[in-house]
Image (tube, grey):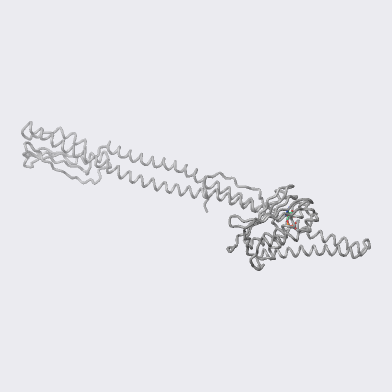
Amino acid sequence: MYTISRKLSILFIACTISAILLVTLFVNLTVTNKFNDYMVDIQNKRYQRIVTYLEDVYKREGKWTENTGIELMHEAYMGNYCLTLMDQHKKPVWGMDPNAINKQLNMNSMPVQETGVYTTKSFEIKVNSRIVGYVDIGQYSTILLTEEDVNFKGSINKSIVASGILTLIIISGFSLYFSKQFSDPIKEVAKTSVNLSRGNYETKSSIKSNLIELKDLQKSVNVLAGKLKYQDILRKRLVSDISHEIRTPLHVLQNNLEAMIDGVFPVTTEKLLYLNEEVIRFGKLINNLNILKEFEAESTKLKYETIFLDEFITEISKDFNLDADKKNIMVDLNIQQNHKYLVTGDKDKLKQVFINLFSNSLKFTEPKGRVLIKLYENDNKITVEISDNGIGIKQEDLPFIFERLYRGDMSRHQIEGNGIGLTIAKNILQLHNASIEVESKEGKGTKFTICFPKNETS
Ligand code: ADP
């Protein structure tokens, strides 16, 4: 197992070494080729110079003697080549000993005299287009290199290797820096996940990276953290709410029954009716939880039919006239005209949704308040708005009100309810492909907006 930074560094360095080796090889080949071409050119010029020199000497002296052009011998000896001067009949006039050159080469231990095989080249010496003699130039390698030439070639190779090593060092530094740019943010996100797994949901990943994938990863981890935190709050509330909802009616029953058994309270029909109400309320809670369980298990069968939403809502709202009058709340029904509000759905289930929303508006609105029900069509959607100017919902409670048993702060627990209506409503609406949203301000009022997809035939 490797860390990302180690793996990336190894990769970078491996790529760099291969690149440097390839570049070194190509540069070396090119330099050697060009250098050899250059040396061959110099060599040819030297041959030409020797021939021209001997031609000039012959022109001047008119014959070959043992001393003709003897001064070339010293240069030839220094340059590690061998000269033999011959007359027009190819009879040697004078010549150098190849063995002497060989000895000198061995003494200087020149490495570049590759083959060691002695080869000669013969050149004609012409005066007035007539061959007057020949000069043989012999050497122990195809290209003759002086010590300076060999040193020059060596220094080029050394600088290629040095620049390769320098590049490797620089690239290693870069690779460490860049691999850290990958590994540091990933390490940070991993640390956040570990914190989350330990239940520390406040942790947020705050990596600084300009890589889209890493930023996305960070975002998802932060979203996950948010969701886990939300679920955690919900779980804690659910446990406390369930125990509260169950404990309260049980307490009332227990206390009253004990008092009756002890003879503190007389057993009257009125008392028994009161206790029966508690039992019914308790039964309702269990019933609602059961309904919810069915929705969540998606085992509820819906009876789909076409519903004229305008008529449907008008009918349901009429059932609340009495309650509204009792609390002196004005209920306005505002239906945008000239539209057919056709939706496909289960009448009984949708009735349950609207009954819950209407009754909540009346329940959470002070006497002399106002409830407005609006129905209109826009963007191929049929929208129902139920707004009131009641007590509103605290901002911090808003994200939770569609969760089961959520009833907001304890002060609301005096108002009849069990915090299940909205959860059921949301589930029913989801089965109808409809959405429900809430806007609310504490002390100002609440608005629920439901959007149905429009029935094709409407
Ligand atoms: P219940 O009304 O039985 O408590 P619901 O699921 O219908 O349960 O509502 C959950 C909570 O949402 C309520 O307890 C209340 O705090 C809040 N709520 C719902 N509707 C309104 C409203 N119109 N105005 C103020 N608060 C509301």
Q: Does residue 147 appear to the left or right of 207 in the view shown?
A: left
Q: Residue furthest front?
A: 338
The total of numbered circles placed on residues is 0
Residue 119 image offset from top left, x and y in percent: 18, 45
Where residue 401 sits, quadrant-wise, is bottom right
In the displayed structure image, the side of residue 152 where residue 66 appears, left or right: left
Which quadrant does the C terminus fall into?
A: bottom right
**Displayed quadrant of residue 150:** top left
Residue 70 seen anywhere in this rendered image of the structure: yes
Residue at image point 70% right, 58% down: 422
**Residue 238 falls left or right of residue 123:** right
Tell me where residue 413 appears, x and y as whole percent: 78, 54
Question: Relative to 183, does residue 56 appear above or below in the rendering?
Answer: above
Nearer to me, 186 or 284: 284
Q: Nearer the viewer, residue 53 or 81?
A: 53
Q: Indicate the position of residue 210 as horizontal and vertical percent values.
A: 52, 45
Instruction: Answer with the quadrant where ligand 1 appears in the image.
Output: bottom right
Most foreground residue, 68 or 430: 430
Residue 231 in sight from this viewpoint: no
Image coordinates for residue 411, horizontal then vertical, percent? 79, 51
The residue nearer to you, when weighing 304 against 438, is: 304
